[in-house]
Amino acid sequence: MSELLDRVKGIKQIPLFPLPLVLAPLEILPLHIFEPRYREMLEDAQAGNQLFGVHFFEPSNEFERNPAVGTVGCVTEIRDAQTMEDGRSNILTNGLVRYRLNDVIDGEKPYLIGEVEFFEDDPGDESETLRLADAVFVLFTRIAKAAFKMSGSRGRFPVIERAEPEPMSFLVAAALNLENEKKYQLLEITSTAQRLSRLNKLLTLAADQMEASAEIHEVSRTNGHSKKKIDL
């Protein structure tokens, strides 16, 4: 059991905050809390274990009020909260671990409460997982360097630290700013190798595009006086 999973050991119910976004484990999420029901949710969480669930929810019609049973969300921990005089709050949260929604309890509180089951990835082929993790890390580093070049290479290129395969897969997914549907698909996968494989395909295309854009940007900054030839 990882430290993150141990953090939620024994918890069966959590407040739910349905939002039109997907939160991944280890991802930082700032939120502005203004609705009365979520103000109460925040107060209850702060008085308890500092946790609530961020659940991707985009209702397809006005009658769809609750997230569907069986869908996946991410429990997040309140790291900082600043409450204003009018009762609104700005909070900073950090995604911890995924959960599967087993039931929705509606009525006991003004906000939803979910009966949940926390989970992490299943064990897999370690050698294959590490191979894919190496490939994803290389591609992500290429993208970061291209982005740094496009920014004008001001300052010093930051050191990118390598994480273990499962957390790295979520950190990369969070950094890519993917569409909700694609990010949710990565969230519900229970195989690190499968998630890394999908990221590898996304990053391969993105790295080529970013590096080409960085080269064009470099040429434009030198008014075309570059020794490098770019085939478009």
Image (spheres, grey):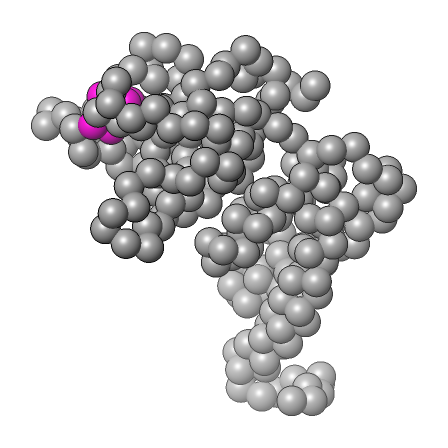
In the image, is residue 101 above or below residue 6? below
The residue drawn where x is 48% and y is 16% is 12
Q: Quadrant of the C terminus?
A: bottom right
Magenta includes 113?
no
Magenta stretch, overall SS:
helix
The residue drawn where x is 60% and y is 48% is 186
**In this picture, residue 43 sits left or right of residue 104:** left
Q: Quadrant of the N terminus?
A: top right
Q: At which x and y percent is residue 177? A: 50, 55
**In this picture, residue 134 sits left or right of residue 106:** right
In the image, is residue 136 above or below residue 38? below
**In this picture, residue 203 sits left or right of residue 77:** right
Q: At which x and y percent is residue 87? A: 14, 25
In the image, is residue 106 above or below residue 205? above
Q: At which x and y percent is residue 154? A: 53, 58
**In this picture, residue 35 sits left or right of residue 81:** left
The residue drawn where x is 34% and y is 33% is 17
The residue drawn where x is 68% and y is 21% is 2
Q: Which residues are magenta?
A: 37-42
Q: Residue furthest right?
A: 127
Query: In the rendered image, is residue 74 in sight?
Result: no
In depth, the one of 156 and 67 nearer the eye is: 67
In depth, the one of 49 and 181 nearer the eye is: 181
In depth, the one of 26 and 185 nearer the eye is: 185
Picture quadrant of residue 36? top left
In the image, is residue 21 above or below residue 117? below
Magenta includes 38?
yes
Q: Residue furthest left?
A: 86
